[in-house]
Amino acid sequence: RFSEIIDQKNPQINAFLEINKEQAQKKALEIDHRLKEGEKVGKLAGLVIGIKSNINVEDFTISAASPTLENYLGSYDATVVKRIKEEDGIIMGMTNMDEFAAGSSTESSYYGPTNNPAAPGLIPGGSSGGSAAAIAAGMCDLTLGSDTGGSIRNPASHCGVMGFKPTYGAVSRQGLLDLAMSLDQIGPFADDASGIALMLESIAGWDPQECTSMEWEVPSFSNLVGEDGKETLKGMKLGIVKQFQEVTDKPIVKIIEKSIDQMQEMGAEVVELSFDYIDLCLPTYYLINYVEFFSATRKYDGRKYGSKIEEVCGDEVLRRIHMGSYISQKEFSGKYYKKALQARSLIRKEITRLLKDVDLLVGPTVPKLPHKVGDTLEPLEMYAYDVLTVMANLAGIPAGSLKAGEVKGVPVGLQMQGKPLEDAKIIQAMDAFE
Ligand code: GLN
């Protein structure tokens, strides 16, 4: 069903780096056969799925879009992939991304940029740009991405699709190549909330193989969606944060305000809040990211897998390795990294305080519109895309993005953030509002 669309669109969009149609076809036939025989099939039966190239899938190239791992063939399935296969999902292939997930535009991929199907000529966002673009272009039903500081929500926003970052620990990271392991989470992209719900309930839950995964009761998310929006949003308390709007470009703020009005008409109650540490978010996030990434890359020394990372990687990855190595030096520990950890706990406390009296925080996902593919941005300009998404990772809370509207034809995303393990509330609200 999708293979024609992929043939037709992928050469230009470059959402998939690798596909295996024969294997997908075989699986589809097997499912058909089992259905005909009256056998039980899984929740994801027949759904075609793309996986970000930093999540291990047996026999696919897990390159993280880097020359470092260009020839690395997955030798096992990550826990999330195992669960997708158990539920009879059909894995079509691996999607494009920024090198090692370090970026917000998918331009740093060794395999060339991905184009935004919803806004031709512009970046799709990143780092999971291929996964978002594959959904936006109708190349598959569901995709997985990873989100360390916004890499699911940012491309969802720019491509006009839905993306969701679960509570930290709600989904196993086993088999995900680390960017910054205290922040990384795997999560789904889909066209709508039922797709998000279906994928999340398939992959979430405790994994004995992964020590940061949580033992929690996974709700049956798909039974919670499909309700009448008025009922779901009635009485829900939504917080809007002054500072989130202040850092955001005006045309985007307008769209978000309109959405909030609509949610109010659907029965939600809106309160205004103030978040004092918006200026701390990016420096805190990037310091932690540099240090953890540096440590994660020490295994790419060219001995066990692939090439020595410093010898082949792109500029942004090299910058992070150098910065991480510098900051990690013993004589600096108190000056940078410890400060970043202190700031992180301040940010977490502040978010907990804001969420105490409301169900969800709602606001823009990304403060500006995507740039043209190939425009050169300074590192700090690129980092500025992330100011509204990194706090959810720093605090470990769940957050999703869905399309709120368009500015001159370019999609704009609305972000919803909730309390830890209240992932269901966000998905229900996204369902009601979509
Ligand atoms: N853009 C952010 C970064 O470059 C987030 C990346 C991500 O979430 N993987 O680190």
Image: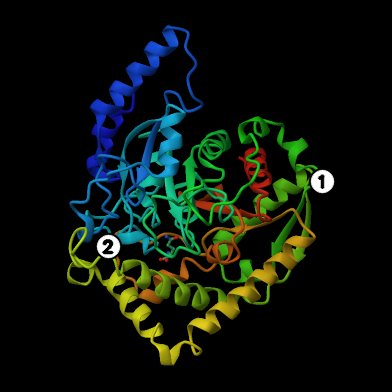
Residue 141 visible from this viewpoint: no
Image coordinates for residue 414, horizontal then vertical, percent: 58, 53
Q: Quadrant of the C terminus?
A: top right
Image coordinates for residue 94, horizontal then vertical, percent: 31, 43
Image coordinates for residue 10, horizontal then vertical, percent: 26, 40
Instruction: Give the residue at x 44% y 71%.
Output: 289
Instruction: Give the residue at x 23% y 26%.
Output: 22
Q: Nearer the viewer, residue 177 or 365?
A: 177
Q: Nearer the viewer, residue 426 or 202?
A: 202
- Reading the image, the residue beneath label 2 is 374
Q: Quadrant of residue 101?
A: bottom left
> Mark 2 is on which residue type?
Gly
Using a 10 Å C-alpha cutoff, classify the residue at mark 1 as few (fewer than 14 neighbours), some (14 to 19) or many (20 or more). some
Label ID, residue 156: none
- Reading the image, the residue beneath label 1 is 235
Using a 10 Å C-alpha cutoff, classify the residue at mark 2 as few (fewer than 14 neighbours), some (14 to 19) or many (20 or more). few
> Mark 1 is on which residue type?
Gly
State left or right for residue 140 relative to residue 376.
Answer: right
Ligand 1's quadrant is bottom left
Q: Is residue 201 positioned above or below 326 on the image?
A: above
